[in-house]
Image (tube, coloured by chain):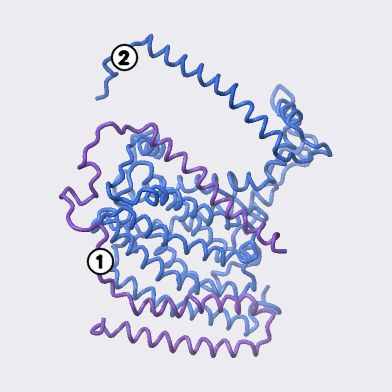
Amino acid sequence: MSVIAPKFKLSEFIKSLFDNAFWGLLLMVLVGLPAVFMVLFVIEMPVINGELLTPFLALSWIADPSRTLPIVHAFMATDMFRIMAFPGFGFAALLAAGTIFIERKMLAKLQLRVGPFYCGKFEGILQLMGDGLKLISKEIIIPAKADKPIFWAAPVLFVATAAAFVALIPVAPGWVVADVDLGLLAVFAVIGFFPIITILSAWSANSKYPFIGGIRALFQMVSFEIPLILSLLGVVILTGTLNLSEIAASQSSFPWIIFLPVGAIVFFITMLAELERIPFDLPEAESEIVAGWLTEFSGMMYGLVQLGTYLKLYAFAALFVVLFLAGWHGPMVVPPFPAEILTEGIVMGPITAKIPGLPLFTQEMLNGALWFVLKTVGVIFFILLPRGVFPRVRVDLLLSLGWTKLIGLAFVNIFIALGLLYAGVLGPGGLQ
Amino acid sequence: MVGELAGNYSTIVLMFAFGIAAMAPALILSRMISPRKRSNPVKFLPMECGQVPSGEGRTHFMMQYYPYILMFVVFDVMAIFLYAWGSALLELPKSATLPMMGFLAIMFGAMAFALYQSGRRRIW
């Protein structure tokens, strides 16, 4: 039971509140506002409606909702919005948080438990927020002989690398953070950083369990990188491009999983291994080596590693959707916007506010993002499912599975793709 | 041309930087609001399930990985060559596939040798 501190005095508490408010205001006036004006003076403002946007115009337009929209439109076209919000970090982190909650509830149902239940009125819906608050208020303990800079940097680098992976995923037509020609190779390059970060953090902890877990993670990720790379070659052969947006766009009539089921299965299994999910969760096997390479992480460092793990899970599931399940393609279910909304604006309630150009996203973009999210959630479900079903495999079985069977199947997949191309089923003159 | 290429890829680096910029404050904030008053040497010992840790943290142990390393060297380089061929396949004439098949045959030979070596457990 928690009690109020023994020396608590209400008057001093109120005084401290006023003190804090005073210092906050003073700092804002003396430092914050000048900083804001300096930034506004230096940054390049966009041209909107034929006028160069100045800080004065921007501030006066924000006061009027009907004139704010051009600013919002201009902001949504910037790289900053894409990185921070929609196809980038915010969107992925939201999906990752949803994944954590759904995993806990679904796993509990599979094992005839109730899972998180008390936090929040309905089915423990606020459990994740509670966990976050708990993690952020816990003390971070670092082992005495750890290599401190690397140990501190590892969780942040893990999240940042997962974010760089998310940057390559196209969510809807034209909505991708980094639309690069060699997107698939860039994905492989980013994936290659995960084992390095893992082994660095494991080495820097200077403790036995993290070290064993880190070595296992290194072996597992390196072994499964080869079948991962080879299993995607079939898609590249059939599409003739490495750009992920073009690969997704090429599946407008049928997804590649119909023609390359072997490649899809191999990619899915290697995905499980790269994500350290059961049945391949040897690097963090709880019943053998405490928590594997996460053993010495405490408090928010552990929280960051978890966030990075689930961002990576989202990114892999999204990559599966883009490569094999036709990305954003799907029947048009979003109704078209009425024409008067685009020209006249929306009439809201008793106060008539006419705001033309209100739907910030086009119909195609909304539909594409909807289908993409639905498919991604489906793939995430299948990634989570084995955790309630399968036991863990031994390390030698894991390695021989990766090196012999999956590589062989990946080559079978390549020959299937070549056969389809040369038999004239797909490619020029074929179905597409 | 080079600048344009770098501009395309710079958004990946920007996203990486945003990941760092958004997550490092979480650690700093946690360090600021979390309690860190009581301290004793036992608290900072490495985790060893309640036992007093003994020996080195970074131990040496055999992982019997050599045949797989051999295969990694074979395949990691090959896979990227295969991507160069696969992404240009639609523009190439069909006869261009034959040398690739020869290349693959040589690689399969190397793979078979490595698998044979990995099966000989007594030489590990």
Residue marked by disc 2 = A8
Query: Secondary structure under badge 2?
Result: loop
The tally of labels here is 2
- Point out the image quarter for the C terminus of chain A: bottom right
Tag of residue B60: 1
In the figure, is residue B48 to the left or right of A81? left
Badge 2 amino acid: Phe
Q: The numbered mark 1 sits on a residue in which chain?
A: B
Q: What element carries label 1?
A: loop
- Whole-number angstrom distance, CA of label 2 to CA of label 1: 55 Å
- Where in the figure is residue A106, as x and y percent of width and height? 37, 49
Q: For this view, does A342 lie left or right of residue A215?
A: right
Q: Residues within 10 Å of mark 2 (few under 14, many from 20)?
A: few
What residue is at 57 percent from the left and 62 percent from the top?
A322
Question: At which x and y percent is residue A151?
Answer: 37, 50
Please state the chain letter of the residue tagged with numbered disc 2 in the rendered image.
A
- Counting from the top left corner in percent of width and height, residue B60 is at 25, 66
**Which residue type does callout 1 highlight?**
His
Pick the front one: A117 or A37: A37
**Is residue A78 in sight in this rendering?**
yes
Chain B takes which shade in the image? purple
Relative depth, front residue between A64 and B37: B37
| Quarter location, residue A184 | bottom right
Q: In which quarter of the image is residue A201?
A: bottom left
- On whether disc 2 and disc 1 are found on a single subunit, the reply is no
Residue at the extreme left of the image, as rendered: B51
Which lettered chain is shown in blue?
Answer: A
Do tag 2 and tag 1 residues touch (Cβ < 8 Å)?
no
- The x and y percentages for residue A259 are 56, 74
Extreme-top residue of the structure = A11
**Residue at 58% over, 44% down:** A84
Does residue B8 appear left or right of residue A99 in this picture? right
